[in-house]
């Protein structure tokens, strides 16, 4: 199918969703082309999205950094953690799902059928960065910054309220110690699969109470998954952070 037909068939909807009309439609299409697609469609006229992803990663980080610097007087270490929570792969994949980016991806048949959520989230996160790169390349800084502010930076209140600037294990440990005075412990429930492809099931306990189980390809990953589920089960939020909002008259510091 020619590129023009792809554009006509699919991509006006995403322009409506994000509120941005591209001058060069091919840049928008390229942002959603995964490398695997080209392996099966070697005559496709556009390249994969990895160069745009490289560009978008830098634009995203600068936009979030600028916003945090302009609006908060918290120490740089705290701002660094907040920024990391807004630009990491988990958040980028989530934003990509919010704007239904998955519906527009160009993937190989194998990738299209792969139900591995972690692998798909990785592709989605990269595609979001590529989309940001495409917006910047086609429409400039102001439009890219508006997109990031609307779809990414709006997640900041949730990041701060739920303590998403900390990893799940640290959040669960701090909450458990503060609320019930107990330090969580982790135990391996099972190991399955060959050595090069093991899956660990890890349980997290508060004293003798088993709170949740998690899975991962490493013990650390399984512990993180267990802690994340335990936070949801207990409905515990992260530690409170003092937020120092900068007023117009405040010095830069």
Image (cartoon, helix red, strand yellow):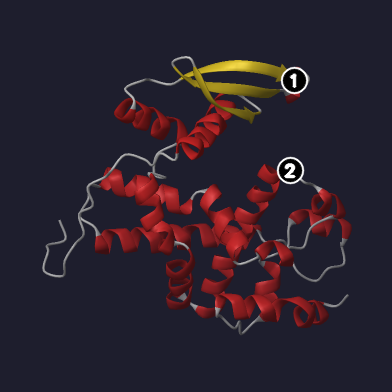
In the picture provided, is 159 more to the left or to the right than 128?
A: left
| Residue 55 at x, y percent in the picture | 54, 62
Question: Label for residue 68?
Answer: none
Could you say which disc has been placed on residue 116 in the image?
2
Q: Residues within 10 Å of mark 2 (few under 14, many from 20)?
A: few
Q: Is residue 216 above or below residue 110?
A: above
Tally of numbered tags: 2
Residue at 83% across / 68% down in the picture? 44
Q: Nearer the viewer, residue 197 or 158?
A: 158
CB contact under 8 Å: marks 2 and 1? no
Q: CA distance from mark 2 to mark 1?
A: 17 Å
How far across and how far down the image is residue 36, in percent?
79, 53
Query: Of residues 28 and 244, which is closer to you in this image?
Result: 244
Circle 2 — which element? loop
Estimate the x, y position of residue 78 in percent, counting from the top left. Answer: 29, 45
Up the image or down, 97 lies above or below 176; here it is: below
Label 1 environment density (alpha carbons within 10 Å; few <14, some 14–19, many ≥20): few
Q: Which quadrant of the view contains residue 71?
A: bottom left
> Where does residue 145 sit, x and y in percent of width and height?
43, 71
Q: Secondary structure at mark 1?
A: strand
Instruction: Give the quadrant of the C terminus.
Output: bottom left
The residue at the point 79 percent across, 79 percent down is 9
Q: Residue at x 43, y 48 (%)?
A: 85
Which residue is painted at 34% across and 30% down in the image?
Answer: 174
Residue under circle 1?
Answer: 192
Q: Looking at the image, is mark 2 or mark 1 earlier in the sequence?
A: 2
- Answer left or right for 245 relative to 78: left
Q: Quarter of the image containing the N terminus?
A: bottom right
């Amino acid at each position: 199918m020619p590129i023009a037909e792809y554009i006509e068939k699919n991509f006006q909807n995403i322009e409506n969703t994000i509120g941005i009309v591209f001058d060069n439609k091919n840049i928008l299409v390229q942002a959603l082309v995964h490398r695997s697609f080209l392996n099966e469609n070697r005559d496709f006229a556009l390249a994969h999205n990895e160069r745009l992803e490289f560009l978008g990663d830098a634009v995203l980080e600068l936009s979030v950094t600028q916003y945090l610097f302009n609006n908060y007087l918290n120490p740089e270490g705290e701002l660094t953690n907040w920024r990391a929570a807004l630009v990491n792969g988990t958040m980028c994949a989530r934003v990509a799902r919010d704007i239904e980016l998955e519906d527009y991806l160009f993937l190989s048949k194998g990738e299209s059928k792969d139900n591995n959520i972690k692998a798909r989230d990785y592709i989605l996160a990269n595609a979001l960065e590529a989309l940001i790169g495409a917006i910047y390349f086609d429409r400039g800084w102001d439009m890219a910054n508006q997109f990031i502010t609307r779809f990414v930076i709006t997640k900041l209140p949730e990041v701060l309220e739920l303590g998403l600037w900390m990893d799940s294990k640290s959040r669960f440990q701090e909450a458990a110690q503060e609320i019930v005075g107990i330090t969580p412990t982790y135990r391996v429930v099972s190991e399955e699969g060959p050595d090069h492809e093991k899956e660990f099931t890890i349980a997290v306990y508060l004293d003798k109470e088993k709170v949740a189980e998690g899975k991962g390809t490493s013990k650390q990953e399984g512990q993180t998954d267990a802690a994340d589920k335990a936070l949801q089960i207990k409905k515990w939020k992260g530690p409170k952070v003092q937020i120092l909002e900068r007023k117009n008259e405040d010095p830069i510091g």
